[in-house]
Structure formats: C-alpha cells, structure tokens
Amino acid sequence: MFPVSRRDFLRGTGVAALGTILPLTGSWAAGGDVVTLRAETRQLEIDGRAATVFGLRQRDGRPGLTAKVGEDFAVRLENALGEPTSIHWHGLTPPWRQDGVSGVSQDPLPPAASQDYRFPLTRAGSFWMHSHEGLQEQLLLAAPLIVEEASPRDEQDVVVMLHDFSFRAPDEILAALKAAPAMGGHDMSMSGMDHGSMPGMSGAMMDGMAMSGGGMAMDVNDVEFDAYLANDRTLDDPEQIMVERGGRVRLRIINAAASTGFTVDLGSLDGSLIAVDGIPIAPVTGRRFPIATAQRLDIRLELPRDGMAVPILALREGAPQRTGILLCPPGAAIKAISSRGDSAGPILDLALERRLRSLEPLAPRPVDRALTLALTGGMAGYRWGLEASSGPGPLPAKVGERIEIAMVNRTMMAHPMHLHGHSFQVVAIDGQRMAGALRDTVLVPPNTTVTIAFDANNPGHWAFHCHLLYHMVAGMMTTLAYEGVT
C-alpha cells in the first residue's frame, strides 16, 4: 500500500474553507487563462448580528487567488460594488501602472467596469490583496494572494486572515477620531474616566497606554472595534480546519486588519517561523510571534499525534480580545474558547525583528542615496504626516541606485510602514547595523529609528505609507518617484 501524502489527504477531505489552499482550476493551471475576480458585497454574521461587508471573490465564491511562481498573474478585476474601487496586490512587484493605487498608479475603477492585469510572478510567498480606495479596506475588501513554490512540499497550507471589524461606518470612525480630545503624551489623570464618555477614544487605548511619570508614554490602539476575526469568524464560532494527526502544517498568517497589531499564539506547540512578508528567513523557533498590520508570517508546525484540536490564536495588542482558528484532526474533541483572554496581548516591539536574517539578502554594495523620513503627528486633531530630508514632495529615486531610508518615529504610536513595488531589507535599528529580513512592511515603534535598504529597480511612482488605515488617510502617506518617470 502506497503512503498517502498530506496533499492527497487534503483532497480526500473535501475541505473548501478559506483556511485551506485548494488547487486553482480554470486559471494559471490551464495555461495562463485570465481569472475573473469580483469586488462585491457579501453578508456575514458576527456575534449574532448580520453585517454587510465587501469581498474579493472568484466567480465560484472562493476568496482571493492562488498561483505558482513562474506563471503569470492574469486577472480581470470586475467592480460589482456601487462605488469606485482599486485593488493593490500587496507584496508583489508589478509594473507601476498595475499596482492598483487610486491617484498614484491608476484612476479608480468605476462601478460595473473591469480592468485587466497581467505580469510575471517572480517570487513565491504569502501575499494579499486589498482596496486602496478611501476606507474600503475597513469593510473587509481584502483577500489572500498565495504564490506557491514551483515544486510543492509535502505539507498542508492553512491561511489565516485576520481582520478588525466595526458595525460603525468607517467614515464615522474617522470623524470620531478627529473630534476626540488629544491625550497621547499629555499629563492627564486616568482616575474616574469613563471610556464611553470619550468619543473616538477606545477602551483598549486607555487600558493599553504605558504610563510614565503620570503621563501617557505611548498610544497602542486608537480604535475600539466590535469584533476581531480570523477567516471572517470570531472565536465564538471559529473556523475548524481538518488536519492530519501528526501532520505538517504551514500556517500563512495575514494581518489584514485596518488598525490592529496581534501576537500569534501557538499555545504549547513550538513553531518554526520560516518566512516574513512572503520572503524566506533563517528559521526562528517559538510559540508566540508578533505581526503588525499588513505583515505576513509563515510558520511551520509539526502537529501532535494525540488527536487533540490545536487552537491558533491571535492576541490583540495591548488588550484582552483575541481571535483564531482550530486545527482539527479526525475525531478531535472541540472545546469552547472565549474571545476575551485573561490578560492583554503583548505590546509589539522589535525584539523578534532584531533576530531575523534573510535567506535572500541584498548583495553588498555602496549606498547611492540616503534619506531620512520623519514620522510625525498625534491624536490632536488626528493629524499624521511624513517629513523627508529631501524636502517636500515625493521621495527621489533613480534607476540603479541603492537607497537607504532611515524612518524616525517622532510620534507616540507605532507605525507599520509599507513601500509599494519593492522588497527592502532591514539594515539598522536605532543605528545598530544588521543584515535583517527582507520585507515590504516593517513596524517602527515610538521613539525608534528603523533603516531600510533597497535597489531602485522598478521605475514608477510608488506609494509609501503607514498601513494603519486611518493614519494613512489622515496624511501619513507619500510616494517614491523615479527620475524621468512622469
């Protein structure tokens, strides 16, 4: 009798949930045919309440896309929403005009219109897609984008996509933030304050603030959401993904939240972190891994043979809320897990970042252009911004340059900074040089300087911004503009 591979095991289960990658039919597997992807409305039930959200689905209802490296990304995007949209292929490095950013690489796609995208897929990894129009990302207009290796491994892929969700409209959230009294970094007693009496100020923001000398040292969360989702579900009704006893699983964790950082908690299992933002690293073993907004973690697990269900949790930063999924071998007993833990999730820092080493580092060469980018702003009026040493306007670049950007955070919040169209290497933290991970999004905590380096090899005008959605729309966004590109 021939042994059954883990991929054969998966096909035999008939699992068709978001969390498990199934073979893609009728697209790249058929030799490069175009896949139709629809931006559309959909219905969810969240904590017993109906919610209308957005989604990115194929015609058969499957969310997002799965492809193989070396093939073409070939997509026809159809806008079935009642409003304009644009979709960014986060982590991919397409030609500039196919990056999907309203006002930077394209005009918004009108309702009932379609647009074609085609470019080669040169890197395998865990990526994702999301709206880059207004505040649509808060309405869950996002989906996984997985590029598999040319030679499949004998392991089960499980995608876990994290979201923060509110029943409030995104523009109401932004208006409340702009109207809220400024507190971050000010001396103000917390005694006797009622969270509910402070519009725009989240309870978690109050609870999660580090106090120093009677003042507030940093702001952790500035929005209080109604629910935190893993694959569109809360822990009150988590997704249960069938796995093999003693099998090997590759978790692909995508933090698609608009404003929330998490810590991935594997419980009593040791996991091996093998890639960040879709790019391989020297493996790091652990049970807890931080993941800032827009980042991705690939974690390899060897499952126990005892047949117990394995919870994979995401702990909200600085607050007790959590979400997650269950990995369930056949016959596993399922125990309820509360959406609220006994303690707050850890505050995200750069302790792990300092340990990461890329397996695909940049080739050593002199730096041709060094820039400083100050991250500015605060809760007063909810104004955020970026100030570059090169002066007002876009950051300059020239084809062929090695560019370093030192991002100096002068605010009291951490900012996950994302550069479009390029992968960069983390080369210094607070001036301490390192050969860190290759990424597309890196967290810059308060009073911290993170330096990144990249090769200017993709001409165009590229968005560069904080990936906290409300910070971006409130001003924390610029562009990288190549010389001679108009």
Image: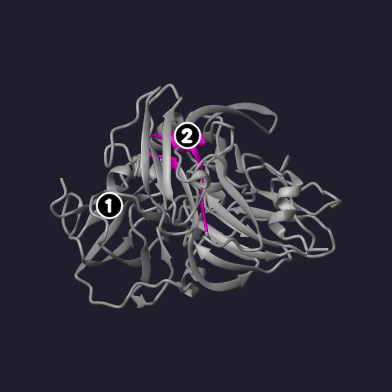
Other residues around mark 1 within 10 Å, as few (<14) / some (14–19) / many (≥20): many
285 within the magenta span: no
Q: What amino acid is labelled 1 in the image?
A: Leu
Q: Alpha-carbon distance for marks 2 and 1?
A: 37 Å
Magenta range: 130-148
Label 2 vs 1, first from the N-terminus: 2
User: Residue at point 61% right, 72% down?
Assistant: 285
Q: Quadrant of the C terminus?
A: top left
Name the mark nearer the viewer: 2 or 1: 2
Q: Which mark is residue 231?
A: none
Q: In the rendering, at what x and y percent does residue 22 appear? A: 63, 47
Residue 308, relative to residue 378: is it above or below? below
Answer yes or no: is residue 182 visible.
Answer: no
Between 72 and 383, the residue placed more toward the observer is 72
Q: In the rendering, at what x and y percent does residue 236 appear? A: 73, 40
Q: How many marks?
A: 2
User: Residue at point 73% right, 43% down?
Assistant: 14
The colour scheme is one colour
Helix, strand or loop at disc 2? strand
Left or right, residue 312 beside residue 482: right
Residue 230, relative to residue 391: is it above or below? above
User: Residue at point 23% right, 76% down?
Assistant: 366
Q: What amino acid is labelled 2 in the image?
A: Thr
Q: In the rendering, at what x and y percent does residue 456 appear? A: 25, 62
Helix, strand or loop at disc 1? strand
Other residues around mark 2 within 10 Å, as few (<14) / some (14–19) / many (≥20): some
Q: Which mark is residue 36?
A: 2
Between 29 and 392, the residue placed more toward the observer is 29
Q: Which mark is residue 386?
A: 1
